[in-house]
Image: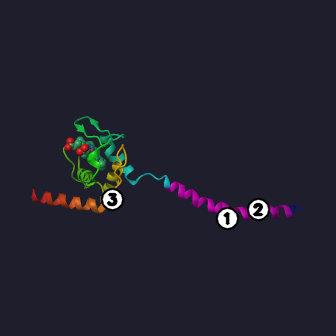
């Protein structure tokens, strides 16, 4: 009798097993949806120090323009060129960040802090602006 009980329990496990196994890919898919935007880490590590966690900028040693609700972010070329070349008290990041990281962080600020500019930002666009910037530097 005991032996039969065991084999029933084993049967139950064998039936439940595949169901348990298929549950884990579903969990992995959920985790993927919740993954942070790739530009978020760049923003938090670099831009946030000046532009603040809420993107509103501030007044310190100089005026740090807000990124929040900023219509100048509508076309990606403008924020890309700021990050590539810097301006005034804003440093340039073409040496510190890869074109991919610049594209990611620009895409991130364009869809956060009240901005809703969802058009694509690609590393190719960044490379083109880096190319233009170095032509300008050579002419100087
Ligand atoms: C050391 C401080 C500092 C850091 C770090 C910094 N910025 Fe800036 N940023 C500024 C300042 C200051 C200005 C205003 C420049 C001016 O007055 O011309 C500015 C301006 C800008 C503008 C133009 C806003 C407008 O309305 O014209 C954009 C876009 C921008 N920053 C994006 C970024 C992004 C993205 C990062 C991170 C990769 C970043 N900044 C990192 C200081 C900083």
- What residue do we see at 31% from left, 45% from top? 47
Labelled disc at residue 54: none
Whether residues under marks 2 and 3 lie with C-beta atoms below 8 angstroms apart, the answer is no
**Other-residue count near label 3 (Cα within 10 Å), few / some / many at <14 / 14–19 / ≥20:** some
Residue 2 forms part of the magenta stretch:
no
Q: CA distance from mark 2 to mark 3?
A: 50 Å
Q: Is residue 26 left or right of residue 46?
A: right
Q: 61 or 20, which lies in front?
A: 20
Labelled disc at residue 100: 3
Q: Position of residue 128 (x, y in %)?
A: 23, 62
Labelled disc at residue 18: 1
Q: Which region of the structure is painted magenta? A: 4-32
Whether residues under marks 1 and 2 lie with C-beta atoms below 8 angstroms apart, the answer is no
Task: Pick whichever of labels 3 and 1 is earlier in the sequence.
Answer: 1
Q: Which residue is mark 2?
A: 12
Q: Quadrant of ligand 1?
A: top left
For mark 1, give the secondary structure. helix
**Quadrant in the rendering for residue 77:** bottom left
Q: Position of residue 124 (x, y in %)?
A: 28, 63
- What residue do we see at 33% from left, 40% from top? 52
Q: Is residue 19 left or right of residue 111?
A: right
Q: 75 or 131, which lies in front?
A: 75
Secondary structure predominantly adopted by residues drawn in magenta:
helix
């Amino acid at each position: 009798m005991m032996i039969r009980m065991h084999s029933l329990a084993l049967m139950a496990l064998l039936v439940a097993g595949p169901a348990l196994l298929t549950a884990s890919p579903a969990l992995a898919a959920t985790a993927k949806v919740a993954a942070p935007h790739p530009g978020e880490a760049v923003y938090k590590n670099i831009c946030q120090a000046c532009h603040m966690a809420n993107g509103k900028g501030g007044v310190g040693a100089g005026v740090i323009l807000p990124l929040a609700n900023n219509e100048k972010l509508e076309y990606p070329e403008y924020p890309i060129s700021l990050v590539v070349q810097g301006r005034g008290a804003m440093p340039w990041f073409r040496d510190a960040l890869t074109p991919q990281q610049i594209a990611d962080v620009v895409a991130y600020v364009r869809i956060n802090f009240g901005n809703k500019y969802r058009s694509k930002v690609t590393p190719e666009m960044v490379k083109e602006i880096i190319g233009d910037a170095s032509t300008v530097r050579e002419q100087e």
